[in-house]
Image (spheres, rainbow, N blue to C red):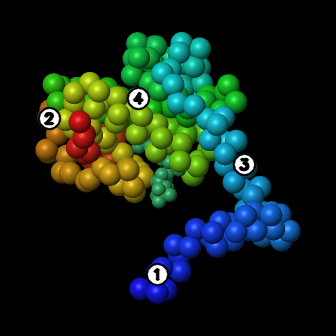
Amino acid sequence: MRAFAHFFKPAQNTAFFCSFLQNMHKTPLSTLILVGMAVFFCYTLSMEIRDAKVTDVPFIHALISSYAQLDRMLFRSHADIYENLQQFKVAIDNNTPIACCALQVVWKDLAEIKSIAVDKSFAGKGIGRELVEAHLAQASDLGLIKVFTLTLEPTFFEKIGFEIIHKDKLPMKVWSDCARCSKQDHCDETAMIYSVHS
Ligand SMILES: CC(C)(COP(=O)(O)OP(=O)(O)OC[C@H]1O[C@@H](n2cnc3c(N)ncnc32)[C@H](O)[C@@H]1OP(=O)(O)O)[C@@H](O)C(=O)NCCC(=O)NCCS
């Protein structure tokens, strides 16, 4: 109890904190921490998630195609992206699009997250997560109950709270995209679902 009380001496704690701030720049490690915090802060400020515009379509098409060529996601034509543009959000860094993701409503209680792609030089910085979470918030606003995805990256979606389900649990309507997939007879995607919190 006495040890616990030690943490609650405001005068001492304030003095310690002030001296910590004053001395922070004096050691290489603390300088590194300060620079890291500044870079992270500036990066967070410069990144924005917004609804896609027609001017983003060439970027979205090129990004999706670059991964589709590697068999990591489905191709989408320019026409397909223009027709479904309202479904897309993009991440913007320094006025330049760097990632995209779409949310397609399929039924009264169900939507699909699709076409998520992050420029590989920005991978691993939390941008994919931010895009999916922005769409999950939108799904909640729309009154949807479940959001599913068919993915080759189940671990990424698991980290966001999606759970693996058997493909048979998804309604037939979901399988319309399969008609244009070269792997329709040997589908290697994992079906995953997220319960939307209203
Ligand atoms: C998969 C993809 C969208 C992830 O985007 P990202 O911005 O790199 O991911 P994030 O930084 O937001 O990662 C969020 C979490 O998922 C994890 N994660 C991301 N990609 C992962 C992968 N391929 N395998 C395992 N975990 C992964 C991260 O480590 C992070 O975990 P943490 O919260 O514990 O730190 C991106 O790598 C990509 O565009 N891949 C190519 C296209 C593709 O495969 N799209 C999916 C088609 S099904």
First in sequence: mark 2 or mark 3?
3
The kind of residue on which mark 1 rests is: Phe
- With respect to residue 190, does 55 lie above or below? above
How far from the left and from the top, in percent, is residue 136? 34, 36
Taking depth in this image into account, of 41 and 190 the one nearest to the observer is 41
Query: In this image, 198 relative to 39: left or right?
Result: left
Residue at figure coordinates x 48%, y 21% from the top left: 51
C-alpha span from label 2 to label 1: 56 Å
The kind of residue on which mark 4 rests is: Ala
Q: Which residue is mark 1?
A: 4
Image label count: 4
Q: Which residue is mark 3?
A: 39
C-alpha span from label 2 to label 4: 19 Å
Residue 166 visible to an observer of this rendering: yes
Query: In this image, 94 relative to 110: left or right?
Result: right
First in sequence: mark 3 or mark 4?
3
First in sequence: mark 1 or mark 3?
1
The kind of residue on which mark 3 rests is: Val
Q: Which residue is mark 4?
A: 102
Taking depth in this image into account, of 89 and 14 the one nearest to the observer is 14
- At mark 4, the secondary structure is strand
